[in-house]
């Protein structure tokens, strides 16, 4: 018996959760989003998401020189999220370059899973935006053709509600909630994103403070400074929440564990900051959309936020000044 | 103001409890072994000096080791017979400890000093404290802090509440559960002893609500005791940690770095209450305790009343031995117990469980880098940021660890339990805590 008894420090039992199971849960949460993308944008959506996932996994496996393609599952999440920020009409090579950049420049050069400073999928997207901006800006976004598979979705394009004038495009808030508007694969359907997001909240993988702070800030800034989109502040605020990548960003990008704060107060500050920078870019910046840069800026501030928001310990006596 | 639903603390985890292995098994007395090994240190504080020599005849219950230190507890012979050896012997703490080996004569002849101390109302506070000290009673939940010290707080710290800890939040263990079912009267009498010694007006027995039968029995037992109440606690680990227990039963928060007495509370384990009752009513020192021998690796799990000093190997033999797939032998529970490499060590006063985990439950996965999921932060019942403290410890940044309140860690193990990257956070924090406390001592 002596030879095989294991000696280690307590505790001696562990949760069944692992990094891999958490990543699988994120993929499951993204399933409704992916499903709606395919229903709206057809086979091109499916192909682009598959290319994103496979490229990211393959690049990571090659980089790590491991045969285990799925690995800890984080590469698949990164690849899928990247594809979801692109239009259905994006050519295959754009997805490949984006996914490879996300894995290599966004993550592996920092030391791999857990060590990257910036959200890898958004690093990939930012590189694409800087290099092939014209393909991601202007009236290049395919108009969805629900339940119409096999047709070339790129034939009819328009501006996104955010880039064009929503009134001019005759887009209703209801349409935007369901997702039946021009936009990136995973960004258009708030409904699908809410389903996935709430599942992650239920599983305890994300904290309400990040999406809550993010969405509330976007809503308030949209209502107060939103201007022309809709006439009354309430609908203008809602427009800014539903338009573009805010919902995907709030539930799936800003909540990236590695690149967001670990303290409860820090998570709230982070969420509010993401909303603030997103809206600053939208309202006053050169790009129509600010989610990518909003979150990347807050990623950079994460270590500082964490250090400034260390929780008060149990029974800490308030220091009298 | 607050309802029953508020009897819950922030943080904590919900491991599988696996108490069904032994919860329904009544306590069985294990026959006294032919030989016992009594460590001279079975408590926090000053170790005892032996009062006997090799070759001496000793009686059952005779004091064989004592110390002049206030924070200490004497040890007693748990069999009658002959002192065979005095020297270092394996100990649950993982290093050899000076111990007295007694060969039993099989007669269990009680020492003549063993006699009832009298009725509670006849005894003064000081007499009670002395009795508890002489009986060698320590915290029997596993912490082994000498019980008489907790009955003698400084005069500037008045105590109004005594809490009996029947939470038994450690998975697998059911020793306290069985005591509550089988000895409710002794527990309540023990609580009254403590209340009298401390001048406390209120007694609370806290029990996790996963033990409805114990709640029922204890509630029945306190029906005619207006000063004593039974509190049903939310089932969540570490509900039995003293800060958490005090918080949910009294709404008081023990200050950081402070003690329960700072908020007018003293708490004791149910086993310690029973031990005090026996010390008063029968004059018996702490020479026997209830131990859950459990885990999937034990052939016949049981709750046993075991003489202190019985070798674990003998206990396991009594329970049919260990299964071949046993991978960890633990003294205590799975969350805070101490893993052992040998069963050749004695049951001591603080041994609440002997647990054998099998391959199926021993996770030997290597850790990967922290993904900052913050699950450790959410699980910490004292609101620390475990992953940052662990990182600081790993890089020997002990000043940073101190700033992150490493010294406040209660070592409950929740952070390690929840970590999906399998990082031994609690272990790193223990290192940090040790270093921080050492540095404070040097200052």
Image: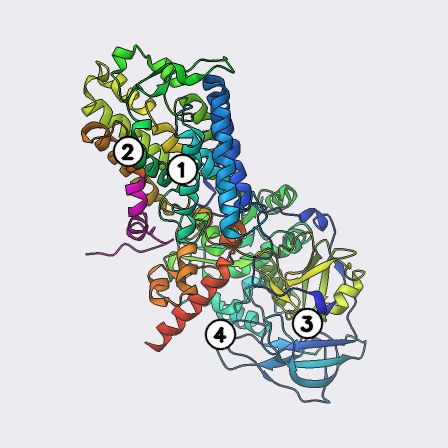
Res. A115 in view: no
Q: Nearer the viewer, residue B75 or A71?
A: A71
Disc 4 chain ID: B
A308 falls in the magenta region:
yes
* Same chain for the residues under marks 4 and 3 in the image: yes
- State how far apart marks 4 and 2 are (Cα): 57 Å
- Image quadrant in which the N terminus of chain B is located: top left
Where B310 falls versus A12 (above or below)?
Answer: below
Q: At numbered mark 2, what does the secondary structure look like: helix, strand or loop?
A: helix
> Which region shows up in magenta?
A296-321
Mark 2 chain: A
Q: Which residue is mark 4?
A: B71
x, y percent for residue B271:
61, 60
Which class describes the residues within 10 Å of circle 2: few (<14), some (14-19), or many (20+)? Answer: many
**Discs 3, 2: same chain:** no
User: For the residues tagged 4 and 2, is the chain the same?
Assistant: no
Give residue B244's position: percent from left, percent from top: 46, 51
Q: CA distance from mark 1 to mark 2?
A: 24 Å
How many neighbours does mark 1 have within 10 angstroms: few (below 14), some (14-19), or many (20 or more)? many
Other-residue count near label 3 (Cα within 10 Å), few / some / many at <14 / 14–19 / ≥20: many
In the image, B141 versus A12, the foreground residue is A12
Report if the CB atoms under discs 1 and 4 are less than 8 Å apart.
no
Please tell me in which quadrant of the rendered image residue A268 appears. Answer: top left
Q: Chain of mark 1?
A: A
Q: Which mark is residue A98?
A: 1
| Quarter where residue B356 is shown | bottom right
Tell me the residue that label 2 is attached to: A275
């Amino acid at each position: 018996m002596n030879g095989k008894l294991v000696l280690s420090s307590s505790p001696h039992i562990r949760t069944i959760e692992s990094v891999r199971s958490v990543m699988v849960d994120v993929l499951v949460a993204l399933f409704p989003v992916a499903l709606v993308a395919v229903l709206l944008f057809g086979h091109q959506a499916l192909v682009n998401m598959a290319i994103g996932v496979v490229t990211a996994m393959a690049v990571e496996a090659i980089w790590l020189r491991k045969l285990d393609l799925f690995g800890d599952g984080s590469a698949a999440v990164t690849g899928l999220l990247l594809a979801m920020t692109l239009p259905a009409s994006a050519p295959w090579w754009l997805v490949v370059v984006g996914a490879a950049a996300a894995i290599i420049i966004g993550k592996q050069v920092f030391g791999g899973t857990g060590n990257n400073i910036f959200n890898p999928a958004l690093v990939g997207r930012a590189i694409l935006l800087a290099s092939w901006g014209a393909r991601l800006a202007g009236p290049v976004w395919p108009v969805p053709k629900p339940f119409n598979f096999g047709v070339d979705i790129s034939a009819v394009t328009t501006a996104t509600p955010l880039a064009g004038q929503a009134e001019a495009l005759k887009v209703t808030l209801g349409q935007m909630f369901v997702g039946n508007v021009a936009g990136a694969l995973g960004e258009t359907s708030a409904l699908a994103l809410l389903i996935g997001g709430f599942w992650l909240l239920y599983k305890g993988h994300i904290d309400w403070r990040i999406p809550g702070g993010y969405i509330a800030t976007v809503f308030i800034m949209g209502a107060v400074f939103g201007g022309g989109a809709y006439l009354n502040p309430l609908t203008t605020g809602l427009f800014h929440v539903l338009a573009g990548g805010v919902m995907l960003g709030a539930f799936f990008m800003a909540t990236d564990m590695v690149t967001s704060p670990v303290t409860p107060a820090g998570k709230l500050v982070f969420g509010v900051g993401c909303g603030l920078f997103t809206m600053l870019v939208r309202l006053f910046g050169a790009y129509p959309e600010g989610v990518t840069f909003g979150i990347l800026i807050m990623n950079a501030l994460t270590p500082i936020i964490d250090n400034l928001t260390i929780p008060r310990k149990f029974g800490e006596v308030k220091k009298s000044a | 103001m607050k309802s029953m639903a508020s009897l819950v603390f922030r943080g904590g985890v919900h491991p599988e409890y696996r108490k069904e292995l032994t919860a329904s098994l009544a306590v069985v007395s294990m026959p006294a072994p032919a030989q016992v090994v009594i460590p001279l240190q079975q408590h926090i504080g000053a170790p005892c000096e032996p009062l006997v020599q090799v070759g001496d005849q000793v009686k059952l219950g005779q004091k064989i080791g004592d110390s002049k230190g206030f924070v200490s507890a004497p040890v007693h012979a748990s069999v009658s017979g002959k002192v065979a050896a005095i020297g270092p012997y394996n100990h649950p703490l993982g290093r050899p400890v000076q111990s007295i080996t007694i060969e039993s004569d099989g007669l269990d002849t009680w020492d003549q000093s063993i006699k009832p101390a009298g009725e509670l109302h006849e005894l003064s506070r000081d007499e009670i404290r002395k009795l508890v000290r002489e009986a060698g009673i320590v915290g029997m939940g596993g912490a082994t802090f000498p019980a008489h010290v907790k009955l003698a707080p400084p005069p500037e710290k008045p105590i109004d509440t005594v809490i009996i800890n029947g939470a038994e939040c450690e998975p697998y263990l059911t020793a306290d559960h069985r005591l509550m079912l089988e000895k409710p009267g002794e527990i309540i009498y023990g609580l009254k002893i403590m209340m009298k010694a401390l001048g406390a007006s209120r007694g609370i027995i806290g029990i996790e609500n996963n033990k409805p039968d114990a709640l029922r029995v204890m509630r029945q037992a306190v029906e005619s005791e207006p000063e004593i109440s039974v509190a049903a606690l939310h089932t969540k680990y570490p509900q039995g940690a003293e800060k958490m227990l005090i918080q949910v039963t009294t709404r008081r928060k023990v200050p950081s770095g402070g003690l329960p007495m700072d908020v007018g509370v003293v708490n004791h384990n149910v086993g310690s209450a029973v031990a005090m009752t026996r010390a008063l009513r029968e004059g018996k020192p702490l020479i026997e305790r209830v131990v859950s021998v459990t885990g999937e690796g034990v052939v016949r799990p049981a709750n046993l009343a075991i003489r202190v000093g019985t070798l674990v190997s003998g206990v396991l033999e009594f329970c049919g031995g260990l299964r071949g797939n046993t991978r960890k032998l633990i003294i205590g529970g799975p969350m805070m117990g101490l893993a052992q490499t040998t069963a050749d060590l004695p049951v001591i006063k603080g041994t609440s469980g002997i647990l054998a985990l099998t391959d199926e439950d021993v996770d030997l996965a290597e850790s990967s880098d922290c993904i900052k999921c913050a699950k450790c932060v959410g699980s910490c019942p004292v609101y620390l940021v475990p992953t940052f403290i662990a990182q600081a410890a790993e890089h020997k940044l002990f000043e940073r660890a101190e700033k992150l309140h490493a010294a406040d860690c209660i070592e409950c193990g929740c952070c390690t339990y929840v970590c999906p990257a399998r990082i031994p956070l609690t272990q790193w924090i223990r290192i940090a805590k040790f270093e921080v406390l050492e540095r404070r001592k040097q200052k």
